[in-house]
Image (tube, helix red, strand yellow):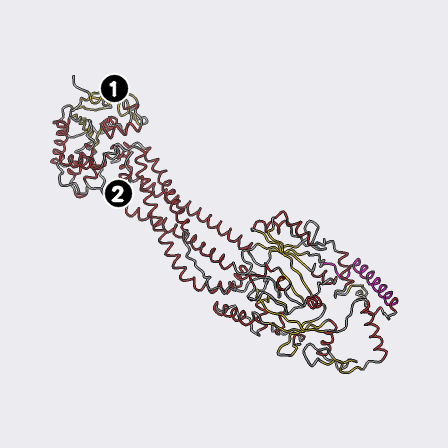
Amino acid sequence: MMERAIKVLNIHKSYGKSVILNDLSLEIPRGKFVAIMGPSGSGKSTLLHLLGGLDKPTSGTIIIDGEDISKLSDKKLSRLRNKIIGFVFQFFYLQPFLNVANNVEIASMPSRLNTKERKKRALHILKMVGLEGKEKSLPRQLSGGEMQRVAIARAMMNQPKILIADEPTGNLDRQNSDNIINLLKNICVKNNTTVIVATHDEAVAHVADQTIIIDNGGVK
Amino acid sequence: MTKFFDTVKLAATKFHAMKIRTALSVAIPSILFAVVLSVVTLTHGVQNTLSDFNDDGLGGRFLVSAYNNIYNQTIDAYNEKYIELVEKSQKELVEKNTQTAKDLGLFYDKSFDPSPVFTEYGMKRVQGAMTNVTEEARQTLSESYRANAEDIFRVSAKYHPTNVFVRNYKVANGGNLFVIEDGVENFEKLKPREGNDDTVSAFLYLGLEITDDNLAQSFITTKQKTFPDSIPLIVTYPDAEKILGLKSLPDSATPTEKINRILTLRNQLTDRKFQVCYRNKTSAELINSAFFKNEDAVILYEMPESPCAPVTVESDKRTDEQKTFEERRIAFKKAIGEYEDAWQQEIAFTIIGFTPETESRMKSNSIFELAKDLTGSSLSSKSVAPRGLLETFEDKDLLEKIFPLKTDVVWKWFSGQDEDFVVEFANREDAMRFVNEKSCVKTETGCATEDKPFELDFYGNNSVVIDELSSMMMRIIVIGLAIAIAFLVLLMVSIFTKIISSNRKEIAVFRAIGFTRLGIIAIYQTYAVMLALAIAILATGISMTVSWILSNIYSGVLTSELRALFSSLDYAKSVVLFQPNPLDFVTFFVLIVILAIFCCSVPAFFAIQRNPIKDLRED
């Protein structure tokens, strides 16, 4: 039987009177590349944020790595986001005045990893995402695709079990998008990392092991 | 929790990220704090300098003069009760004198004691001139309490005085003092005065004010310790100028001119001895008659040929009857103790020190005068003899003969007592309470009561006012500081709110990466501390520079002004406005860091409470 990375049971999420997710349940196996698709406003990002412990469901249960995260304290959720989950955003959100290596190292700051180990790991990951030699560059000296690689490297810094990416190619051209999709796929395969990508990009769906369509607050 | 070094590293990125905002955040508070720091630094300088200069004279001491004011000023000449009392006393006086004359076989005529009551426009009134009779009547009508030395201890006890000094007034026994210059007795003082011009005898009044050495000490410029053959005197600067025939300096005089004047007076007059001729009342009257010779008078006197010699008769056209009448009158006056034969004797005075004149001006004519009035200290408006040094004068009999403790009712009534007191306190509060609670209140019938037997006033200096001004200044600085801090708190809260609200996405990303809320607050607090240190360093730099420049510009001129103001010839003393107090800066650094942490924590706390999703979605 395939090991579950995430199990979502009957979650509801609403902001005021607006219902975003309604009685949604799903399971995501460990080490799979999952694409979450759906029209704008369907609740894809909300689902990602709930899965990443950035938000809490109005009701329902989310089990990640065997633990119900809807009951965790803020401190434990922070720890979960730091150790188990890696986030990649559409707009990268890099620190403009830190170089590439330092941007990647940021992710290990909350875990108080020692400096030597941190640097070694950052260099290794940068090499993995194809940014060897760019360690000292500032974000403004990079292309969009390179910046997203740095964001992915940052997300991978703590060797998370789950990598959550919200529209990672939404701000890139086709070629860069393809490169990022391939990179995410490689990470998934080589590291046995569960990769969940919310996207409108059909190309992502093509490489995904599983595609979940969200519509009207539920799984279609 | 994030490592400290990592927190600092992330906080430091904000200096790059928000250059203009950071620059403004540092510049505006820095300037404001620099102003506050400069004021505090300069205030320290002013306070320390004033306190340094204030050591001269009576500065810094909390002294209160206590004077038994029993004088009833309001009894008018037409007061029936007053007239009745005067007439009664006059009648008793005439009866007593008539009886005395009869007992002694002497001639007495009531015209020897003319009545002070006379009729004017059909109404009785008492003459204005004081006589024993009129003043006894005033005393009888007065409801004032007559205090003695015990009263001052009684009323001041609960205010914790540290010292009680006695001041005595000895009056030249109805006679007059004439300075002997170059072997000639100078009678110029008898001439009507013109303006402020005066003679060398200006410092010699009709009396001696004797004060405690403790009070006089800081005004003494002589090194002599004993004065066996002269009376030691501290004279006022204006008198000293008159003695040297110098005109007072104009208000526009420069500090250097003022200092030079003080130097001149001190150098030329300290230890200068004046030979003086004391002439008793009879001798002085004869001198007066000889000086203003009335050719129509029946008896003419001749001025003495040698100093302090007796007056001689030039011509006597009196009839035998007139002579007999005068002889009898004199014999009678001698019998009742109101006449003594003419005598005169030389006595010497030595100038041993100087005191600025006490002057209660209604208004000051210049800032210098205002400052002088405020900060100056003085012993008296007259010449003063320190009691201890006066004790070294050997001819005690002569001293007592010339300056007896005056018991004459007119003198005692007019001056209150022949002694008054100066009470010293350790602090302003006690001195103020004593004056406010125990000074008698002047009424139509006098002032002193048993509970409040003295008219109290601050003595010798304005320490109480200066201390109060100083406290007020400190209060103003503290209030100013509080307002500046309140303003800065608002400013910093608004700056940090702006900074943090523009960093919401970053905060959301940090939270997504796994930073705890406290970890994120720590980043902003660290940024605030760095900003605060930058503000503190800049503010310190600006304030030090400004204070130093101001100090350098004004120290020289202020030193001269203060030396003149305090009559200080101690050249080691100078105005140093730039007197930074390290404790102020430590306090300031701690204060600004705490403020910055507080001002940043409030918006940061609200920012981390936000749902990061909302902030991430804004794109």
Disc 1 chain ID:
A
Q: Which residue is mark 1?
A: A9
Alpha carbon of mark 2 to alpha carbon of mark 1: how far?
Answer: 42 Å
The answer to whether residue B223 is left or right of residue B108 is left
Which residue is at the front of the view, B566 or B86? Answer: B566
Please give left or right for residue B249 compared with residue B104 in the image: left
- Which SS type dominates the magenta stretch? helix
Q: Bin the neighbour count of mark 2 within 10 Å (Cα to Cα): few under 14, some 14-19, many 20 and up.
A: some
Residue ID for mark 2: B13
Q: Secondary structure at mark 1?
A: strand
CB of mark 2 within 8 Å of CB of mark 1?
no
Whether residue B471 appears in magenta in the rendering, the answer is no
Picture coordinates of residue B219, whole percent (x, y): 56, 63
Quadrant, the N terminus of chain B: top left
Q: Disc 2 is attached to a residue of which chain?
A: B
Q: Percent from the top left, x then y, of residue A101?
A: 19, 39
Q: Is residue B568 left or right of residue B579?
A: right
Residue range (magenta): B74-102
Q: How busy is the neighbourhood of tag 1: few (under 14 within 10 Å), some, or many (20 plus)?
A: some
Q: Which of label 2 and label 1 is nearer to you?
A: 2
Classify mark 2: helix, strand or loop. Answer: helix
Q: Residue at x 38, y 40 (%)?
A: B598
